[in-house]
Amino acid sequence: MTNTQKISIGLSVGFIALAVLLMYTTSQKALGSAPIGLATSFSTTTPVLVGPNWAQIFYNSSVPNCSSRVITTSLYPIRLAFGTTASSTATSTINISSSIGILQPASTTVAYDGGIYGCGFIGVQGLDVGTSTVTLTTFN
């Protein structure tokens, strides 16, 4: 057997072993999300005015479970905080500050997965000098 044949056989065995190893390894599970294949339908749209000096609350008690919530901003950026009760982080202006919460830029639309962010309260605070309309669309 020549050296070329030995190298070819060695590489073939290595590739087969690698292929078998990759077939039997499991991928990491997602930390959370809406179930795969979950059928959704349009549920509600809620517009709210927000400004820099107060926090507004998004919550729809008729939709305790959701697949996602889509938030659309207009003129100014906003900061979001997600919570499970009215007395949680979502309603506290102290907790919706420049260093805590999720920043959503102006004139954007972002979908927040219900399995990751939950379907509870959302505190919204404007980050500029004027007031702006923010719209929440809930899918369930």
Image (cartoon, rainbow, N blue to C red):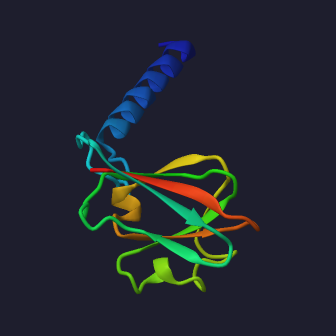
- From the viewer's perspective, tell me whether residue 61 is left or right of residue 71: left
Q: Does residue 140 appear to the left or right of 108 in the view shown?
A: left
**Number of callouts:** 0
Residue nearer the viewer, 56 or 77: 56
Residue at horizontal 67 percent and vertical 64 percent from the top: 131
When the figure is inspected, residue 4 is found, relative to residue 65, above or below; the finding is above
Residue at (35% x, 39% y) in the render: 21
Is residue 31 visible in the rendered image? The answer is: no
* Residue appearing at x 70%, y 67% in the figure: 127
Q: Position of residue 130 (x, y in %)?
A: 73, 65
Residue 19 shows up from this direction: yes
Query: What x and y, as percent, mark residue 96?
Result: 59, 77
Nearest to the observer: residue 133 or residue 35: 133
Residue 17 against residue 61 in the figure, above or below: above
Residue at 38%, 31% in the rendered image: 19
Q: Is residue 125 above or below residue 66?
A: below
Residue 117, quarter of picture:
bottom left
Determine whether 102 is above or below 24 in the image: below
Question: Which image quarter: residue 33?
Answer: bottom left
- Could you tell me residue 28's position as x and y percent? 38, 52
Residue 42 placed where, x, y %?
A: 31, 43
Q: Name the side, left or right, on which 100 lies relative to 92.
A: right
Q: Nearer the viewer, residue 28 or 89?
A: 89
